[in-house]
Structure formats: C-alpha cells, structure tokens
Image (spheres, grey):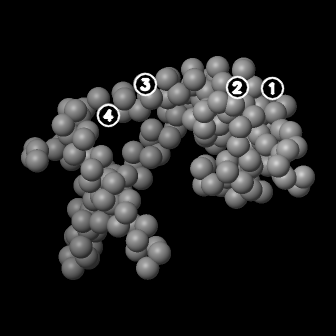
Amino acid sequence: MFLMTPTPDPVDAINTQWRAAKPDLDTVPMDVIGRIFRIADTVGARMTKTYGRYGISRGEFDVLSALRRSGEPYTLSPRELAATTLLTTGGMTGRLDKLERAGLLTRSPDPKDRRGLRVTLTERGRELAEEAVVVGVAVQREAMAGLSDAQAEQLTALLRLLVRSSEASVEG
C-alpha cells in the first residue's frame, strides 16, 4: 500500500468547509465519491471531445464498441445492446437511428424471430470503433499518468470493491 501526502484539491476544500460548519459530519464518503464524480466529469468531458472528432457521442461510441466487442459478425439484438450499454431499448432506438443514417450500422430482421431485429456493424463502423477506442484509451491513460502501474492496480481493486459495495447497497 502506498501512502503519500497529497496536495489538497477542491474536494478537500469542500470537506474542510463542512467540518467547520457541521463538525459531527463524517466526510470520508465525500472524500471518495466526490473525487469519483470529479474524475468522471473531467475525463468524461475529454472523452466527449475525443469521440466528437469522429462525429459520434460517448453513448454512440458505446453502441459501436459493444457491437465490435461482440466479435464477428458484429451483430446483436437491440435488447442485447441495451443490456450491455445499460440503456433502455427505447433509449437505444435514437442512437441506432443516428448511427444507421451515418452508415455505421445496419438493422435487419432477425431470421430466428419474426418480431426481432439484428443490429450489425458496417465495415466503416468497425473501423471507426477500432480507431476511436485506441484514442479513447489514450485519453484515459493520460488521465492516469500520475499513477504507477502498482498504484493503478491497487486503485482498480479498490474501485471494484466499491462498485460491488455500492451495487449491493442499492439492491439490498
């Protein structure tokens, strides 16, 4: 485990103010979750800008990425896509419409289910997904530049525990 004296950040300032205003308040959760929110906001803005250069949003990248990760023939149902991108099927429709108009995917009837559809990545969509993921990972790597490999591994393990804990508290 690494220990260091970090330079104070805006979350520290907020927590200092809360401790002065309400000394009995335990601000440790704000130390963790506040920083997660700040990271999500700053890196999310960078990712939005990065994917915007490709003419797609972060959500649209998620759809293309899910199709690319699915392996050949890069085809999923709208329901499978919604599950892997954590969207409702209704929310998925607008994204699929835009990506289809851009020639990045196609929709066709599901041969196994007359009522179903299959969404397939086009060659252009596959190329875009592969290029955008490399650039997106570079942005994420840059955001983590201040961490050693060991620190990144430790943080990953801790965040995995936090994800499980937070999901369990919602389910319970």
Question: Which residue is at a point 26% across and 53% down the rendered structure image?
Answer: 158
Residue at the spot of label 3: 138
Residue 168: x and y, percent? 40, 71
Say left or right for 106 vs 152.
right
Tag 2: amino acid: Gly
Residue 130: x and y, percent? 57, 23
Residue at the spot of label 1: 103
Say left or right for 118 vs 171.
right
Residue 43: x and y, percent? 45, 38
Residues marked 1 and 2 touching at CB (< 8 Å): yes
Q: Earlier in the sequence, mark 4 or mark 2?
A: 2
Residues marked 1 and 4 touching at CB (< 8 Å): no
Residues marked 4 and 2 touching at CB (< 8 Å): no
Question: Which residue is at a point 66% across and 24% down the rendered structure image?
Answer: 126
Tag 3: amino acid: Ala
Q: CA distance from mark 4 to mark 2?
A: 28 Å
Say left or right for 31 vs 5.
right
Above-or-below relation of 5 to 147: below
Question: Which residue is at a point 65% across and 30% down the rendered structure image?
Answer: 72
Residue at the spot of label 4: 144
Q: Crowdedness of circle 3 by 10 Å Cα count: few (<14), some, many (20+)? A: few
Q: CA distance from mark 2 to mark 3?
A: 20 Å
Q: Earlier in the sequence, mark 1 or mark 2?
A: 1
Q: Earlier in the sequence, mark 3 or mark 4?
A: 3
Q: Crowdedness of circle 2 by 10 Å Cα count: few (<14), some, many (20+)? A: many
